[in-house]
């Protein structure tokens, strides 16, 4: 299969006149499949040239940190990107010894370089489709703040790249791969990242705890990081799987039968779950290591639950953090977070779906923590400075070890204590069919269209089409009561809309809430 994907990468020429084959930046860059004419060499040449053009017009003249993950298409796409960037005179920094590079390591490298305010600022590109199936490819651009570029930037890059795609990249310069590699400068992403970890997580507490940790990189870029950390024998980290296979043949199928390296999925994490009794904590990451999976004796933690544990712990174990710092969550993250933040007398910062909304706050130090329900988060260093402005799954795994070392509680036990104090929510996400017209109607929804006073027997306390934290449009709607809520937004790729719902009154109430949410949406769409 790999050869088929690689041949298609080079041989298939996408039709720029077909909107489905054009370059499209979503919340995590452009993704696609070579065999479906959505991730081919011409796509990457065009995007690389557009990034070079954007840097020039934005006055970005420092190094560009270029990373890649372990998907089959990542290596050829990385080579194509490097050839174009070097041909444009970009100072490209590549991983020492051609080691694969995790997303948070690229973010960290950008922040480190720019920390002293150099005249020539750095940025980065990561070749990764994250946890997507093995046949997929992806590319994303991280700006000078180290985080995913905002919509204005990616929109500019997307439009410019599609112009190049339109003429078959005839105007895109490139040098030979040998010349590109010779002119690129090697950078020790892993060494620099690991050497700085003590500024953000209490490694000494882990060393002194005698905890036994098992790490599964799921065949991804966290492997060299965990290998480096495991050299410190006091950390007591065992690598349970050191296989790198672009087909990810060792992975059990996900819930739908497809191979998907989603460390928040019990199906995808089945191999680690089988051996969890061998460790005090078992931890995993997706291929670009921006997501985390936390396993203890109770099983794989729900990401919503673990994020709440993280926030409650951090707010009581980071005394140098200013009390004015806010906690960031997406609007579909559990409301348990709201209760935890309020109980710690801090302010919540609720934003639309997408980690990009946390970048500014993490970068300027006004957000202590930013997390989303899909198992992605980052937080500040002990002294309140930015650690990474992209999701860092490795960091969140190490934090689980710190929490257990310091409190004596496994993450699931810590969460159980939170539920005793704040209640036990039940949460679900479901997909419902939607026509194109219905999906389009979501954009025009207003609070005034919702005339209901109650939802699932409780008074409606809030109706939102913009996020309370930053006022940005959520692309849908969220309706809240004191003991539950639902949010709905259309899919960007399928003819469905997604309903997220949560109840603090139990499973029956959650089901009623979902049914009434569907009926309500049926009346206004």
Image: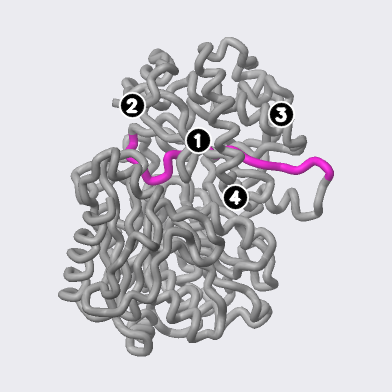
Q: Image point 71% across, 53% down: which residue? A: 112
Residue furthest bottom as drawn: 421
Residue 127 magenta-drawn?
A: yes
- In the rendered image, the quadrant that contains the N terminus is top left
User: Which numbered disc flags the more N-terminal residue, 4 or 3?
Assistant: 3
Find residue 147 and name its label.
4
Q: Is residue 159 visible?
A: yes
Q: Image point 24% across, 63% down: which residue? A: 517
User: In the figure, is residue 479 to the left or right of 508?
Assistant: right
276 is higher (above) or lower (below) than 115? below
User: Which numbered disc flags the more N-terminal residue, 1 or 2?
Assistant: 2
User: Which numbered disc flags the more N-terminal residue, 1 or 3?
Assistant: 3
Find residue 2 and name its label.
2
Estimate how packed mark 4 is, as few (under 14), some (14 to 19) or many (20 or more) residues with alpha carbons within 10 Å.
many
Q: Secondary structure at mark 3?
A: loop
Estimate how packed mark 1 is, as few (under 14), some (14 to 19) or many (20 or more) residues with alpha carbons within 10 Å.
many
Real-space Cα separation, disc 3 to disc 2, in angstroms: 31 Å
Q: Which residues are magenta?
A: 119-134
**Percent x, y of residue 481:** 33, 76
Q: Which residue is mark 3?
A: 90
Real-space Cα separation, disc 1 to disc 4, in angstroms: 14 Å
Magenta-drawn stretch, dominant element (helix, strand or loop): loop
Real-space Cα separation, disc 4 to disc 3, in angstroms: 20 Å
């Amino acid at each position: 299969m790999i050869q088929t994907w690689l041949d298609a990468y080079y041989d298939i020429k996408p039709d720029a006149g077909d909107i489905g084959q054009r370059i499209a930046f979503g919340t995590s860059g452009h993704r696609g499949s070579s065999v479906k004419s959505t991730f081919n060499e011409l796509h990457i040449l065009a995007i690389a040239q557009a990034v070079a053009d954007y840097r020039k017009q934005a006055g970005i003249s420092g190094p560009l940190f270029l990373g890649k993950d372990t998907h089959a298409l990542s290596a050829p796409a990385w080579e194509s990107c490097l050839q174009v960037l070097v041909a444009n005179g970009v100072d490209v920094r590549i991983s020492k010894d051609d080691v694969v590079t995790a997303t948070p390591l690229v973010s960290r490298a950008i922040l480190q370089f720019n920390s002293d305010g150099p005249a020539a600022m750095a940025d980065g590109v990561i070749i990764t489709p994250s946890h997507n199936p093995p046949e997929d490819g992806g590319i994303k651009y991280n700006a000078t703040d180290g985080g995913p570029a905002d919509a204005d930037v990616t929109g500019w890059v997307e439009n410019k790249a599609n112009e190049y795609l339109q003429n078959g990249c005839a105007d895109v310069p490139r040098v030979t791969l040998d010349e590109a590699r010779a002119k690129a400068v090697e950078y020790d992403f892993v060494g620099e990242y690991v050497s700085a970890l003590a500024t953000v997580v209490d490694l000494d507490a882990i060393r002194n705890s005698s905890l036994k940790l098992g790490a599964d990189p799921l065949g991804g870029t966290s492997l060299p990081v965990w290998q480096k950390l495991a050299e410190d024998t006091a950390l007591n980290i065992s690598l349970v799987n050191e296989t790198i296979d672009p087909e990810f043949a060792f992975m059990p199928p996900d819930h739908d039968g497809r191979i998907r390296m989603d460390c928040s999925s019990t199906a995808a994490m089945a191999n680690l779950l089988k051996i969890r009794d061998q460790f005090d904590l078992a931890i995993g990451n997706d291929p670009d290591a921006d997501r985390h999976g936390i396993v203890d004796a109770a099983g794989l933690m729900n990401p919503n639950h673990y994020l709440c544990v993280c926030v409650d712990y951090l707010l009581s174990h980071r005394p140098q953090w200013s009390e004015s710092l806010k906690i960031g969550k997406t609007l579909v993250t559990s409301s348990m977070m709201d209760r935890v933040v309020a109980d710690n007398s801090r302010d919540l910062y609720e934003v639309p779906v997408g980690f990009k909304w946390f970048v500014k706050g993490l970068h300027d130090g006004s957000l202590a923590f930013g997390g989303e329900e899909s198992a992605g988060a980052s937080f500040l260093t002990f002294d309140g400075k930015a650690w990474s402005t992209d999701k860092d799954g490795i960091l969140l795994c190490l934090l689980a070890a710190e929490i257990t070392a310091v409190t004596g509680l496994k993450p699931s036990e810590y969460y159980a204590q939170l539920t005793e104090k704040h209640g036990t929510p039940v949460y679900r996400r479901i997909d419902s069919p939607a026509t194109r017209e219905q999906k389009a109607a979501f954009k025009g929804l207003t609070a005034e269209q919702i005339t209901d006073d109650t939802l699932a027997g409780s008074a409606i306390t809030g109706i939102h089409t913009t996020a309370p934290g930053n006022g940005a449009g959520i692309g849908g709607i969220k309706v809240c009561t004191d003991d539950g809520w639902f949010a709905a937004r259309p899919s960007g790729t399928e003819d469905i809309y997604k309903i997220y719902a949560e109840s603090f009154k139990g499973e029956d109430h959650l089901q009623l809430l979902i049914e009434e949410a569907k009926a309500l949406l049926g009346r206004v769409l």
